[in-house]
C-alpha cells in the first residue's frame, strides 16, 4: 500500500505561477474589495504569499509609449486598506480581463467532461453539452484533439449508483479472482472508475471492513434496505490495483523494451532491475491462482523465473487450458 | 547600487504580456529587451545578451503554451527579418469572450472533470485551466459526491505525443505490434489522442506507409522522438472522427466464446461492454482481435473460443508459449 499523501500538492511550475497571476488579477478587480485571507483561499495559496503577489503587482504595469514605466501605467492599490486592514482594493489596473484557456487546457477539461458524462445520471444532462460548447469558445485556438468515449451506464451500474445516491444496502452475488462465488451484503460508499473499470467502495457487513468490489465481477446486485453510514475511505485510486498484502512474490524477466506490457502489474514501490537489455521485476500476487494470468501477459516476450513452483503452476495452468480447448 | 535581484520568471512573463498588450503596432525584440522589466535590468550587461535573447525565445513559447495570443508582425518589405519583427498581444484575442461566463455549478462540474486525470500533462493542463477559472470567484473544491471517475495516462508516450500534436510535428517511436517479438520504428503525423474502452490510442497518419493508422499507447515501448518535420494538420473534428471509427470497428469485430457456467470468465464477459448472450455462447466485441486474444487467454481453462479461427489460434498460441517458457 502506498504511504504517499494522496492530496499532496505538486510543485508549482513557472507556467502554473503565471496562470495564477492571470487568474488572480481579474478576480481582485471583480471583487472590488476583498480580504487577503479570502483571496488566498480562493487561489489556494497562503495569506503571506497573497501579500507578496499584491506587492509585486503594485510595482508593475504597462510601459508608456517611450518605454518608461510611469505611475499612471502601474497597478495601484489602497495602501491604507492593505497595510492596516489586510484588505485588497485596486485603484488602478492596466489589466482587468479574464484570460482564455489554451487549446490543451480546454481539451483536458473537455475530455474530462466526456468521462463525467459516463456517470449514471450525467449522460442525459443538457448543461453538460452546453458547458462543452462554452469551453471550446473560451479557448484561444482550436481545442486540441483529445477525446474519451462515453458509454452510457448499463443496468448494473445504474442499480449501484442509485444505491450510492440513496444510501441503500446491496446484496451482491460476487465472483472473486479465486473463482469463488460469494454472497456479500454491503453498504455503498462511493462508485469509482479507473480507466474503463468500475469499482464500488463499500462497507462489507460479512467482513466488517471496508472493501472494494469490481462491478464486472458482480453477477447481480439487489437493493435490500437502508444502509448505515460508515467512514469514507480516502485511498488513492491507484491503490485499487494492488494485490492484497501477504500474497505471493514472483520474479519475472522481460526485454526492457517490453516492460510497459506489464505496467499495470507494477506498483510504484516495486523494484525493477536492469541487466543489459533485460528487465527483472518482482511482482506481488494476491494468490497462486493468478500465476497463469501473469504468465499469459508475458507470453512471447518473457517468463516467470522464480519461484520454481510458480513456474510449474504457470505451465500446468496453460496445459489445462489447452486440454480444455480440445 | 544594490545587488541585482533576479525577477522570477512568471513576473518577467507577466510584465511582457502587459507590455505587449499595451501596444497596437507592436514592439521589436530590441524594444522588449531594453525596456520591459525583467529583461531591461539585464540589458546593459553585454556578456549576458545572448542569454537574454534565449530567455525571450523561451518566454514566447511559455506564453503560447498558456494560450496567450502572441502575434508576430513582419516589417513590410522585410518579411522574416527577426530584428525588425514586431510582437503584440491583441486584447480581443486574449480575453474571454463576453458571453463566456462560468456559473458556480459549472465550475463545480469542471472541477469534477479535472479530477478525472490521475497524472501527466492532462492533470497539469486541467489544473492551469481551473486556476484561470478561479477568476470567476466560485469555489474549486474537491468534489465530495459519491462518484469519482478517473482515467490514467501512465504511458510515457502520452505527453510527448500531445506536445507533438500541439506543435504540429512528426513523431517517431518503437511500436510492438501485438504478437510480434521485436518492436519496429514508426514515423507518423500524430493527429488525435483517443481513449476508447479504457485504452489510449493514437490516431495518426503513418508517414512510412502513407496511410492512416491507429496505435495503442501501451504498445509504444520506447521513447517518443518529436521530429523537426512538420506534421499533417488534424481535421477540425479529428478526435471525434477517430472515436467513431474505433466504435465502428468495435461494433463490427465480434468473437464467439463459451465460458464455464458460473465461472469468473462467465460473470466478467457477460458484464463486458457490448456482449450479447445467446444460449451458451457469448458474442463479444473488440477494436483489436490481438488485444482480445490477450484478454481471453488470461481466463485459461474457463473459456473456449469458437470463432473466428484466427482468434482461437492466437489464444492457443499464447498458452503454448506459456507452457514452453515455463517448462
Image (cartoon, rainbow, N blue to C red):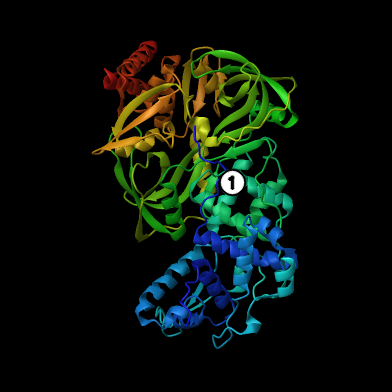
Vertical relation: B78 (above or below) A175: below
**As rendered, which of B272 and B112 lies closer to the eye?**
B112
Q: In the structure shown, which secondary structural element does the residue marked by tag 1 occupy?
A: helix
The residue that disc 1 covers is A112
- Identify the residue at the far left of this view: A276
Vertical relation: B102 (above or below) B182: below
> Residue at 63% across / 81% down in the picture?
A73
**As rendered, which of A147 and B255 lies closer to the eye?**
A147
Query: Which image quadrant for residue A83?
Result: bottom right
Residue B73 in view in this figure: yes
Residue A183: x %, y % from top left:
62, 14
Vertical relation: A162 (above or below) B232: above
Residue B159: x %, y % from top left:
44, 50
Q: How many marks?
A: 1
Residue A257: x %, y % from top left:
31, 39
Quadrant in which the C terminus of chain A is drawn = top left
Left or right? Give the position of A37 relative to B262.
right
Query: Which image quadrant for residue A35?
Result: bottom right
Residue A301 in view in this figure: no
Q: Chain of mark 1?
A: A
Residue A174: x %, y % from top left:
58, 18
> Residue at 52% across / 70% down in the picture?
B13
User: Around disc 1, counting alpha carbons within 10 Å, would you say few (fewer than 14), some (14 to 19), or many (20 or more)?
Assistant: many
Left or right? Give the position of A78 relative to B175.
right
- Identify the residue at the far bottom of this view: A66
Amino acid at each position: 500500500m502506498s504511504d504517499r499523501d494522496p492530496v499532496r500538492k505538486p510543485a508549482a511550475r513557472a507556467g502554473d505561477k503565471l496562470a495564477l497571476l492571470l487568474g488572480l488579477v481579474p478576480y481582485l478587480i471583480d471583487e472590488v474589495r476583498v480580504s487577503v485571507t479570502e483571496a488566498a483561499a480562493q487561489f489556494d495559496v497562503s495569506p503571506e504569499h497573497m501579500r507578496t503577489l499584491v506587492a509585486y503587482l503594485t510595482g508593475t504595469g504597462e510601459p508608456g509609449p517611450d518605454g518608461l514605466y510611469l505611475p499612471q501605467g502601474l497597478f495601484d492599490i489602497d495602501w491604507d486598506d492593505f497595510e492596516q486592514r489586510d484588505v485588497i482594493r485596486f485603484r488602478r489596473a492596466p489589466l482587468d480581463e479574464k484570460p482564455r484557456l489554451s487549446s490543451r487546457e480546454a481539451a483536458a477539461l473537455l475530455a474530462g467532461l466526456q468521462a463525467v458524462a459516463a456517470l449514471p445520471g450525467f449522460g442525459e444532462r443538457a448543461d453538460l453539452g452546453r458547458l462543452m460548447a462554452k469551453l471550446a469558445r473560451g479557448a484561444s485556438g482550436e481545442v486540441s484533439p483529445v477525446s474519451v468515449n462515453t458509454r452510457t451506464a448499463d443496468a448494473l451500474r445504474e442499480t449501484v449508483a442509485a444505491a450510492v445516491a440513496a444510501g441503500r444496502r446491496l446484496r451482491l452475488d460476487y465472483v472473486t479472482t479465486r473463482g469463488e462465488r460469494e454472497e456479500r451484503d454491503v453498504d455503498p460508499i462511493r462508485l469509482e472508475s479507473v480507466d474503463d473499470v468500475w469499482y464500488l467502495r463499500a462497507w462489507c457487513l460479512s467482513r466488517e471492513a471496508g472493501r472494494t468490489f469490481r462491478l464486472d465481477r458482480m453477477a447481480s446486485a439487489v437493493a435490500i434496505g437502508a444502509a448505515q453510514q460508515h467512514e469514507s475511505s480516502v485511498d488513492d485510486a491507484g491503490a485499487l490495483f494492488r494485490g492484497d498484502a501477504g500474497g505471493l512474490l514472483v520474479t519475472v524477466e522481460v526485454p526492457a523494451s517490453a516492460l510497459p506490457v506489464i505496467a499495470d502489474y507494477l506498483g510504484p514501490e516495486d523494484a525493477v532491475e536492469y541487466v543489459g537489455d533485460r528487465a527483472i521485476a518482482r511482482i506481488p500476487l494476491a494468490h497462486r491462482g493468478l500465476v497463469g494470468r501473469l504468465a499469459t501477459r508475458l507470453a512471447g516476450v518473457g517468463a516467470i523465473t522464480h519461484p520454481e513452483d510458480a513456474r510449474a503452476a504457470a505451465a500446468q495452468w496453460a496445459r489445462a487450458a489447452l486440454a480444455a480447448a480440445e | 547600487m544594490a545587488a541585482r535581484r533576479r525577477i522570477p520568471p512568471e513576473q518577467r512573463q507577466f510584465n511582457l504580456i502587459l507590455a505587449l498588450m499595451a501596444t497596437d503596432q507592436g514592439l521589436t525584440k530590441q524594444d522588449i529587451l531594453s525596456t520591459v522589466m525583467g529583461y531591461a535590468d539585464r540589458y546593459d550587461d553585454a556578456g549576458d545578451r545572448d542569454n537574454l535573447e534565449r530567455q525571450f525565445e523561451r518566454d514566447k513559447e511559455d506564453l503560447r503554451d498558456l494560450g496567450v495570443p502572441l502575434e508576430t508582425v513582419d516589417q513590410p518589405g522585410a518579411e522574416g527579418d527577426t530584428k525588425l519583427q514586431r510582437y503584440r498581444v491583441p486584447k480581443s484575442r486574449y480575453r474571454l469572450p463576453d458571453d463566456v461566463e462560468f456559473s458556480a455549478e459549472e465550475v463545480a462540474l469542471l472541477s469534477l472533470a479535472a479530477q478525472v486525470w490521475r497524472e501527466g500533462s492532462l492533470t497539469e493542463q486541467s489544473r492551469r485551466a481551473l486556476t484561470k477559472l478561479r477568476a470567476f470567484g466560485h469555489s474549486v473544491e474537491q468534489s465530495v459526491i459519491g462518484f469519482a471517475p478517473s482515467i490514467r495516462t501512465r504511458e510515457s508516450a502520452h505527453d510527448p505525443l500531445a506536445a507533438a500534436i500541439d506543435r504540429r510535428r512528426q513523431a517517431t517511436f518503437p511500436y510492438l505490434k501485438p504478437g510480434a517479438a521485436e518492436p519496429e520504428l514508426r514515423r507518423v503525423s500524430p493527429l488525435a489522442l483517443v481513449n476508447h474502452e479504457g485504452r489510449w490510442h493514437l490516431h495518426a497518419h503513418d508517414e512510412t506507409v502513407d496511410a492512416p493508422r491507429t496505435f495503442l499507447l501501451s504498445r509504444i515501448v520506447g521513447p517518443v522522438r518529436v521530429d523537426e518535420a512538420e506534421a499533417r494538420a488534424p481535421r477540425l473534428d479529428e478526435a471525434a472522427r477517430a472515436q467513431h471509427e474505433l466504435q465502428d470497428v468495435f461494433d463490427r469485430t465480434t468473437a464467439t466464446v463459451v465460458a464455464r457456467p458460473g465461472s469468473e470468465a462467465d460473470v466478467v464477459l457477460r458484464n463486458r461492454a457490448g456482449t450479447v448472450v445467446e444460449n451458451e455462447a457469448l458474442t463479444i466485441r473488440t477494436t483489436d482481435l490481438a488485444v482480445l486474444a490477450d484478454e481471453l487467454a488470461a481466463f485459461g481453462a474457463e473459456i473456449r473460443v469458437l470463432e473466428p479461427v484466427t482468434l482461437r489460434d492466437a489464444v492457443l498460441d499464447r498458452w503454448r508459449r506459456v507452457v514452453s517458457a515455463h517448462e
